[in-house]
Amino acid sequence: MGGRAPLWLFGDQLGRHFHATPENRGRDVLLIESEAALARRPFHRQKLHLVLSAMRHLAGELGDRATLVRARTYREGLARFGRPVVVHEPGSHAAERLVADLIEEGLVEAELPTPGFIRSKRDFAAWADGRRRLVMEDFYRDQRRRFTVLVEPDGDPVGGTWNLDRDNREPPPHRAALGVPRAYRPREDDVDRGVRDDLDRLLRARRIGPVGVDGPRLFAATHDEAWRALRRFLTTRLASFGPHQDAMLAGDWAMSHALLSAPLNLGLLDPLAVVREAEARLRSGEAPLNSVEGFVRQILGWREWIWHLYWYLGPSYLDRNALDAHTPLPDWWRRLDPSRVSARCLRTALAGVRDRAYAHHIQRLMVLGNFALQRGFAPRALTEWFATAFVDGHPWVMPANVIGMSQYADGGVVATKPYAAGGAYINTMSDYCRDCRYDPRVRLGPDACPFTAGYWAWLDRNATRLTGNRRMARPLSGLRRLADREAVVEQERHRRRY
């Protein structure tokens, strides 16, 4: 094995399905901590901690097989290592360009396919080419059939239906918490203490500029931790995941969510193995179909789809702006300062990002994303914010999620209509409005909910652009009948407090 080129692993390629495959077993492993990469964006402090902790834990686990180099840049780290390496497909367009340059320079011998996703880029392109629409539901069904997940021998879906979303949209219960067992919580160790000391040193020297607050590590940083987190979710929380997965509770940030996106996106878990484990819980009767299908949809469907859209649509997708939105992100938003916000839903979500670098998918879409859509935040800047402020954010994760799903800036490539909603939706699906300064039923005056009034002002601003969308016909008809339309629009034009 000694003649084989070492394997260089990026910080999101840390699982055994990357370095312990037959192709890579026995290769030396290189890990590079690039200070330039840490300082390139205002990453959340806890995100930086998690990535460094995961890399250092892996180096310790691999022992003499691994070399951990701390350098100013990746190129400098490779030069100091002194041996050509191979690398798996990286997770961003910028990293892909870097790898191409390094191959020309002779520092990288070859780029290997990534084992971090279930379907290859070539297979996705073959599926997508020539299609009039790139709808996730179509892709998800093809995934289920191709990998025989939750399907009968004849190829039909288990239970007779592909999509159980209608069973998974229940509002939250009338209590402060969902009442399920707590999610897995890792224990910090000497590696974490060393990471924290190093980040403190870089911060004091002003060599990094993170956002958010430091805190105990909440997410898995090793293979064993990730599998413990997965098994705890499957055993104690999967059964209750489905019905309330779109609900929100101010006092229960985790509810029944898996909290596995961070270890998945660090490459600590093999996504198909995760799907098979969930499927096994259905066969054993430990979890109902609606919960298992909802969880499988997020990994086999949504996660895979988002990855492939990132590569298929290309770098120019980041510049799409179908609704001509150009408002800069407010300082309080960038700095994660919920004290500047009165609306309880927005304040709670922003505080969650500040304190944990995390908010679950409905908080992201229907609170943070909905607010940004209504206020016309610039889509590219918003995408970068989500990618850097969230512990599971990576360059490939956010473009289709934010530009497509959340902001409708691609004009309908990802979503068939904008995900805009007033305060009534948030009131139905959460307990936020009970003790809020604003009234979700009011759109004019000092008690006007910024989401209710903001929805109508947004619809007025984009009415012409949305006229051709059949799914927006009813809201646009309601806008035309709105007696106080002009007053609401004027109020929101001058609103400075939320």
Image (cartoon, grey):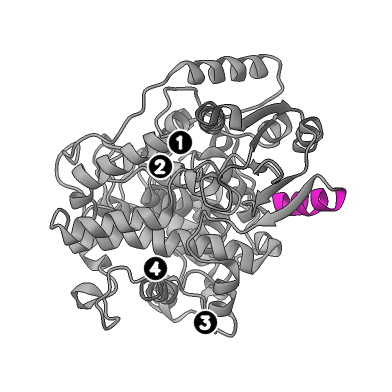
Question: Which numbered disc flags the more N-terminal residue, 4 or 2?
Answer: 2
Q: In this view, does 226 lie to the left or right of 76?
A: left
Q: Which amino acid does label 1 sit on?
A: Val
Q: Where is residue 411 drawn, in percent x and y?
A: 57, 71
Report the residue marked by disc 2.
359
| 93 lies above or below 3 | below
Quadrant containing the N terminus in the rendered view: top right
Residue 342 visible here? no
Tag 3 and tag 1, C-beta contact below 8 Å: no
Mark 1 lies on a secondary structure that is helix
Report the residue marked by disc 4.
482
Observer-nearest of 343 and 22:
22
Q: Distance between the residues labelled 1 and 2?
A: 6 Å
Question: Which numbered disc flags the more N-terminal residue, 1 or 4?
Answer: 1
Q: What's the residue at 60%, 20% (across, down)? A: 199
Observer-nearest of 39 and 249:
39
Q: What's the residue at 43%, 32% (across, down)? A: 356
> Which stretch is magenta?
94-105
Furthest toward the right, the residue is: 105
Q: Distance between the residues labelled 1 and 4?
A: 35 Å
Observer-nearest of 329 and 2:
2
Report the residue marked by disc 3.
468
Mark 3 lies on a secondary structure that is loop
Q: Which amino acid does label 2 sit on?
A: Ala
Q: What's the residue at 27%, 43% (across, down)? A: 231
Question: Which numbered disc flags the more N-terminal residue, 2 or 3?
Answer: 2
Q: Which mark's residue is nearer the viewer, 3 or 4?
A: 3
Question: Which numbered disc flags the more N-terminal residue, 1 or 2?
Answer: 1
In the image, residue 90 lies in the stretch drawn in magenta = no
| 177 lies above or below 282 | above
